[in-house]
Image: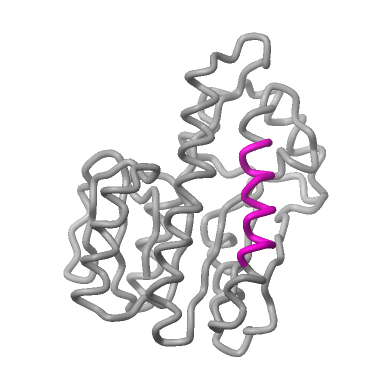
Amino acid sequence: MIITGTRKGIGRKLVEYYLNKEYFIIGCSRGETDLVNDNYKHYCLDIADEYHVKNLFKYVHKDFKRLDVLINNAGVASMNHSLLTSVSTVKKILDTNVIGNFLFSRESAKIMKMNNFGRIVNFVTFAIPFKLEGEAIYAASKAAVVTLTEILSREYAPFNITVNAVAPPAVQTDLIRGVAVDKLNKLLSRQSIHRYGTPEEICSVIDFFLQPNNEMITGQTIYMGGL
């Protein structure tokens, strides 16, 4: 299994959860991690850097000859009015959320198709259907990931590779730490279930996508918490 964005937050929780399920996990982030486990290998890289991404997958192909699961968790957000959003911020968000997602999906599929099996799970956001003010570029980047999910699911179907997406509910992580409490409360009120989600609940949705007998479930996006 490969998981992106594993140094902290939901990504770190995903690693811990799937290590307990006895996966060998390759994780990556821009910085180092303090997680030490015989079944975990960490890479420091920019997920939008094609050269370093390809090198990571060369290692996977050489040492394992297979890849079963990719979880595209890494992402960056900018919660700011569009009039105050710089082009450099726009490029950073699009590079990480769109290009990074595409690169890891493409390189993963190259290995997965060798064994005629694979599961790709992308992370998107409720900012898309809620049309959240102040998150125009973030929501637009994740809307692109929804489209990628749907099209890649068709392109990879002949290789028995499914591609699905999950939009987590609001979870108390570093991503929302700087958001005003009143804005978060307003967001929770718009969900059908008016509370924060947990990493374990997100993992349960991912587990559903990963089940070998769910090969007919592809091109789908699950918005947790309810629209």
Residue 122 position by quadrant:
bottom right
Which sits in the foreground, 73 or 93? Answer: 93
**Horizontal placement of 121 versus 5: left or right?**
right
Residue 201 location, x and y as percent? Answer: 59, 61
Q: In the current view of this chain or complex, which residue is farthest to the top? A: 84
Q: Residue at x 37, y 46 (%)?
A: 47
Q: Is residue 118 above or below residue 5?
A: below
> Majority secondary structure of the magenta segment?
helix
Query: Magenta segment: does it hold 101?
Result: no
Residue at image position (69%, 27%) is 136
Task: Tell me: 150 left or right of 93.
Answer: right
Q: Residue at x 67, y 62 (%)?
A: 151
Q: Quadrant of the N terminus?
A: bottom left
Region in magenta: 140-152
Q: Quadrant of residue 218?
A: bottom right
Please provide percent x and percent y for residue 23. Answer: 34, 76
Left or right of residue 135, residue 11 in this image: left
76 vs 161: above or below? above
